[in-house]
Amino acid sequence: MYNANTLKLGLFGANCSSGRAPTKVPERWSASWEDCLALARMADQAGIDFMLPIGRWKGYGGETDMHGESLETVTWATGLLAQTERITVFGTVHAPLFHPIIAAKQCVTADHVGEGRFGLNIVAGWNEGEFEMFGVEQREHDARYVYAQDWIDAIKKAWGPEEDFDFDGAQIKLKKVRAKPKPYGGTRPLIMNAGSSGPGQAFAMRNCDAYFTATSEARKGGVDVMKKMVAGIKAEGAAQGRDIEVFTVGQVVCRPTQKEAEDYYHYAIIEHADWGTVDGMLRIKDITPEKLGEEEYRKKREYFASRAIGGYPFVGSPDHVAEQLALVSRGGIRGIAFSMINYLDELPLFRDEVLPRLARMGVREG
């Protein structure tokens, strides 16, 4: 993340089986340690800026049980940081499930292994089934961010210069805390969050360096509308005394020609969708045929499979994908975390064809 690239590029979701694609195609992502390590080394050498994992504890069912296998994110990040040289690797941590002093120590350990290349993605939690696994009761929505505020305040204090301290928050109270060593190089890890609700966005503005948001609606209005959206978010951050950067998420399907890319995208994401997984995700969000009606539900599940789970689809030839990514950059978005159906198979074409085009467009270093 510490380079001159105007548009930061990251790989999203590689620690979970199927990545961000609810598909049954046999080449779908495995998330095995061997594949993750090979991907991290390839991405590091290619100049990809970061890797961002999903904090997941339980799959969604269906034939593939998407995310049924996942690697815990902080230990995953630590292992990848030990085997790479430049790439930033995030850990995604559920604040209600990790004690802040343990989380602070885990993050510092990863940060020392990576010599300052670890980042923290804070998750307040939403999946009730996962919380039940831990015997933890999910807080009412707004209260989650009250707790998360105590949590990150305690972590920042543990990362700070004090030798011993007490912490007296609204929901977290700690006595005689000692947390050493401090983060690598006298700084602290980058912090990001993707809260979409009012309290979630306010939490990000107060505490984070990077805020992840969807751009689908803004993209419909073109670059000027996107710039306005980004300016509004940055103004909220500035009101809190913070210079926050705006990121987004997406799914890249790049092939030598536009037709090949579109055909494969439809084949993998629609024709071979794991609709059982999609239904499982929607059920957690209390979206069912009984509530919406069969026809409306059919439209919802197809939209969810094609554009919601993986984020905005960047589908096309290297020229098209590069132009679409450059458009996001011109709209003021600082970076994008994207997934692929099989990262190891698909990253080489992106590396060899899309990255040079982005460099020629002036949004990436050559």
Image (cartoon, grey):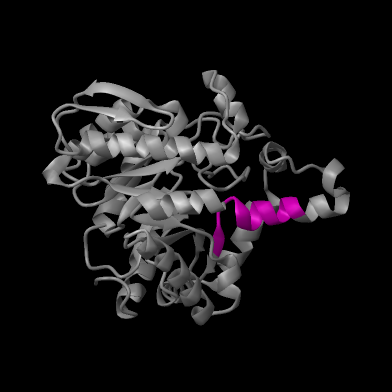
- Compared with 151, 264 (above or below) is below
- Classify residue 229 as left or right of residue 73: right
Counting labels gives 0
> Looking at the rendering, in which quadrant would you find the C terminus?
bottom left
Decide if residue 257 is in sight here.
yes
Decide if residue 15 is in sight here.
no
Q: Give residue 277's position: percent from left, percent from top.
A: 67, 39
Task: Identify the residue at image location x=43%, y=29%.
Answer: 171
- Compared with 252, 328 (above or below) is below
Task: Identify the residue at image location x=32%, y=59%.
Answer: 242
Task: Identify the residue at image location x=36%, y=58%.
Answer: 240
Which stretch appears magenta? 300-313
- Compared with 351, 20 (above or below) is above
Q: Does the magenta stretch include residue 229?
A: no
Q: Does the magenta stretch include residue 301?
A: yes
Q: Give residue 82's position: percent from left, percent from top.
A: 21, 37
Q: Give residue 266's position: percent from left, percent from top.
A: 65, 59
Quarter of the figure with residue 53: top left
> Looking at the rendering, in which quadrant would you find the N terminus?
bottom left
